[in-house]
Image (cartoon, rainbow, N blue to C red):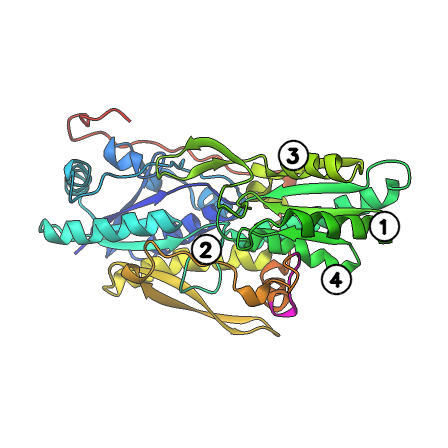
């Protein structure tokens, strides 16, 4: 029986999320006797609610293949929290109405932890309502905090970008520290998990005096200032990599802006100036600071080759799992060895993934709390290996923009304005 599929991108996009989309679409096209049209949600799950469905069948084979090299979200993403179906079934009923109207039997949701929870709920609700949809979650998060998978697509490329940027900026500071900047502070993403910050710690292997501030360790002002000052006295300069999720001992974020997103998460950003100004006030060292922000997650030009490979393979695996009859699962990466790096694709039940956050193991953080251990390096280095440069024209990467043609609506407009 041929059924259509729905694919949606969710949350903050990455340098490689479109590689997963490419894997989904290319694999689905191999099975025309089982999967008809692959619809993509315009702006993620919002596209399902508003019945704004993109017919990917209009896209050429070449353009779909070019998604492997294109950053951002080719179909648009969103941060939108569906209402709890036990309290308000309206949105879930709307999703099923849209799925029924367009004969959608496969649901592929490409996102992080909140998306895994949504995918799990849709799977359960659709079964309860007598219109079962095979819901497969495709992992994606630069935070690398999903459980039951060795790593998350998107993380390897961010880690590579941060490690390179930390190294290059440090060499710049080292060149000028005698008469100019002595401390450089780089703020990276990571709300509760310090995986990205840890990547900045890899530059210690290049002889860079670096101090890393992790969300997993409360900010110890006295110890931190002492370490920075010691580095400046010994080397003439110091680099600090601070996670946006770094907290004071009382649990407050250094960078909490006071606002919340749709999922209740604090809007973070501003840890770097807090740290830099503290250094100036307490130590008097000249400084500069930077916030990597969107640059770190969109830097496709220097993406990790292994990250691109895994993002694509997990997109392919999601379709294969659905065709094998699996439901409410997530394809995973299982590490087999560090050197050489080998892995295989596995799977995990969404009930074991949803609402579970994987933090940095304490054994990955150095005893003083300001660096990474050899065990951590063994984990990180394989994930940043290789380059997969995009094609370029006139000196710039040549990224693809899809047609994104919408199908005709079959239902009345959704009653809720989004």
Q: Determine the CA span between mark 3 and mark 1.
A: 22 Å
CA gap, disc 2 and disc 1: 36 Å
N-terminal label among 2 and 1:
2
Boundaries of the magenta span:
370-375
Q: Is residue 175 above or below residue 202?
A: above
Badge 4 crowding class, 10 Å Cα cut-off, few under 14, some 14 to 19, many 20 or more, is few
Q: Is residue 120 left or right of residue 181?
A: left
Q: At x 45% / y 41%, what residue is drawn?
A: 12
Give the vertical position of 376 relative to 44 (above or below). below
Query: In the image, is 299 to the left or to the right of 78?
Result: right
Label 1: element kind: helix
Estimate the spatial distance between the alpha carbons at disc 4 and disc 1, rounded to whole Å. 20 Å
Of the residues tagged 2 and 1, which is closer to the observer? Answer: 1
Foreground tag (4 vs 1)? 1
Residue 389 in the image: x percent, y percent?
Answer: 63, 49
Residue at point 90%, 36% (across, down): 179
Q: Which mark is residue 145?
A: 2
The residue under label 1 is 233
Q: Are marks 3 and 1 in contact (CB under 8 Å)?
A: no
User: Can you see residue 386?
Assistant: yes
């Amino acid at each position: 029986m041929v059924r259509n599929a729905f694919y949606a991108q969710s949350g903050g996009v990455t340098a490689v999320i479109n590689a997963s989309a490419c894997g989904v679409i290319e694999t689905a096209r191999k099975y025309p006797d089982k999967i008809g049209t692959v619809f993509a949600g315009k702006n993620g799950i919002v596209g399902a609610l508003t019945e704004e469905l993109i017919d990917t069948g209009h896209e050429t084979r070449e353009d779909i293949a070019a998604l492997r090299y294109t950053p951002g979200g080719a179909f648009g993403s969103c941060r939108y929290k569906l209402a709890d179906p036990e309290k308000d079934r309206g949105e879930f009923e709307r999703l099923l109405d849209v799925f029924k109207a367009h004969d959608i039997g496969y649901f592929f949701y490409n996102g992080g932890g909140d998306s895994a929870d949504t995918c799990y709920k849709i799977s359960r609700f659709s079964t309860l309502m007598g219109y079962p949809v095979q819901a497969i979650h495709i992992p994606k998060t630069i935070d690398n905090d999903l459980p039951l998978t060795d790593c998350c697509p998107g993380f390897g490329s961010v880690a590579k970008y941060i490690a390179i940027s930390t190294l290059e900026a440090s060499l710049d500071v080292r060149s000028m520290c005698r008469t100019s900047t002595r401390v450089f502070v780089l703020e990276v993403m990571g709300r509760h998990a310090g995986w990205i910050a840890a990547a900045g710690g890899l530059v210690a292997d290049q002889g860079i005096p670096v101090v890393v501030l992790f969300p997993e360790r409360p900010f110890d002002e006295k110890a931190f200032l002492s370490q920075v000052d010691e580095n400046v006295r010994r080397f003439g300069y110091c680099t600090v990599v601070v996670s946006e999720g770094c907290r004071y001992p009382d649990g407050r974020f250094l960078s909490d802006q006071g606002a919340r997103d749709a999922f209740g998460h604090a809007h973070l950003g501003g840890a770097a100036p807090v740290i830099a100004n503290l250094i100036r006030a307490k130590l008097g060292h000249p400084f500069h600071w930077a916030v990597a922000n969107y640059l770190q997650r969109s830097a496709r030009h220097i993406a990790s080759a292994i990250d691109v490979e895994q993002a694509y393979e997990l997109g392919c695996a999601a379709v294969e799992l659905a065709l094998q009859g699996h439901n409410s699962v997530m394809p995973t990466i299982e590490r087999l060895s560090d050197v050489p790096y080998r892995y295989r694709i596995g799977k995990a039940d969404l009930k074991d993934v949803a609402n579970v956050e994987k933090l940095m193991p304490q054994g990955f953080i150095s005893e003083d709390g300001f660096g990474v251990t050899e065990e951590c390096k063994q984990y990180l280095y394989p994930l940043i290996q290789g380059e997969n440069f995009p094609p370029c024209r006139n000196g710039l990467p040549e990224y693809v923009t899809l047609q994104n043609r919408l199908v005709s609506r079959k239902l009345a407009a959704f009653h809720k304005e989004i």
